[in-house]
Amino acid sequence: MGRNRRSDHPQTQRDPQPGSQQGPMDGFLQPPRGNGGGNESPPPAAQHSAQAPGGDPTAIERIGEELRNIAAAMATKADLLTLTTTIQDALRAEMAGLRTEVTTQAGRIQALEQTAETHSTRINATDVAIARQGDMILHMRRNLEDLDNRGRRCNIRIRGIPEADEGENAAEVLTNLFRTILHTDAPQTFEFERAHRALRPRSAEDGPRDMICCLHSFPIKDTIMRKARERPTWPFQGTQVSLYNDLSPYTLEARRALKPITTALRERNIKYKWGFPFALMARHQDNWLAARWPDEIPRLLDTLNMPHIQFTDWLLDTSRPVQRQQRAARRRGERSPPGPPPRRRMGRGEQAE
């Protein structure tokens, strides 16, 4: 019987074997080890409930006070609405200012565009007028050059006649020269409108000055020049003299510019001559071809089956003949014509006369 009788003493919970693992919930799931005893520690749940802040009324009140302060410091709906309204008003004011400035700038830009368009129209009209006036000036220059040459058509320039130490009779000297050139075709007398030396100081370094005469009759002058072209120089008074037509400085400048063209024509045995108003005329298949402007020279060369030859545009710089005359005058020691006196600045209280 003793074997089947249970023990009155409760079975003691075995301690966990060493090396076994325990989770965090084992303390709650295991029953207490004894009915009582001051030495046994309370379960973890009891410890947690004892340590909870809810057990301290002062701490709860303090937390509640902090929460109320936080809630009081937070913005309310009215504050947010006021802030939103203030931001919207500021943005509206800024946008209104920007809109006004943009409108002003748009008006200014439109005015500038209209002004630029007006100026562009005026500039285009001015360019057209300037081009037209340039053409008119060129034609006026050609007309003036032709008038100048027509005024010189009875003139002959003689180069190489020695100057006498004392005064000489230019008409008598030229009469003897023309009779030498014409021989039996010479008239009894030659009527001169004027005959004189070139208007520059006498200088031994530059040689004798040219003689210039104006014959009263153009046919006689033409007869002399035709006969004079038979030879480059003529013997007279122990020296060789040459006869030339008296031409405008601009005509001489144009002929110098076309010297490469005339040289090429002579090398190819192509006859050429000068026309008035100024033109270079070349013989081609029993016809005379004329080039009066610089842009017509290439077409003339193409018609003559000649390569293009570079030459100077004689219309680009119209001041070269005048400058050349001024430089020659300075070399000869001549004085330039006096210009207008410089203008003096008027002081205070003075009046223009």
Image: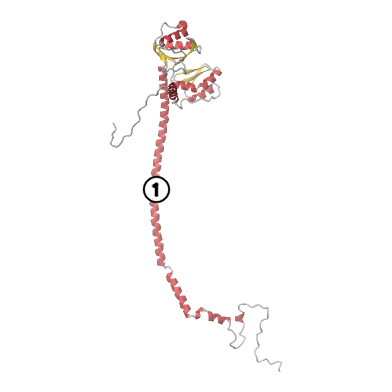
Q: How is the image coloured?
A: secondary structure
Identify residue type, mark 1.
Answer: Gln
Residue sitting at x 51%, y 78%: 53
- Say which quarter of the image contains residue 165: top left
Residue sitting at x 40%, y 47%: 106
**57 lies above or below 151:** below
Residue 155 visible in image: no
Number of numbered discs overlaid on the protein picture: 1
Assign a secondary structure to mark 1.
helix
Horizontal relation, residue 81 to residue 290: left or right: left
Q: Position of residue 344 (x, y in %)?
A: 33, 32
- Mark 1 packing: few (<14 Cα in 10 Å), some, or many (20+)? few
Residue 297 visible in image: yes
**135 lies above or below 96:** above
Q: Position of residue 3 (x, y in %)?
A: 71, 92
Q: Position of residue 12 (x, y in %)?
A: 65, 87
- Quadrant where the N terminus sits is bottom right
**306 lies above or below 220:** below
Residue sitting at x 45%, y 11%: 224
Instruction: Residue lying at the far bottom in this picture: please name it.
Output: 1
- Say which quarter of the image contains residue 213: top left
Circle 1 is placed at which residue position?
105
Horizontal relation, residue 41 to residue 329: left or right: right
Q: Nearer the viewer, residue 47 or 11?
A: 47
Residue sitting at x 53%, y 20%: 263
- Quadrant where the C terminus sits is top left
Q: Nearer the viewer, residue 87 or 167?
A: 167
Q: Position of residue 136 (x, y in %)?
A: 41, 26
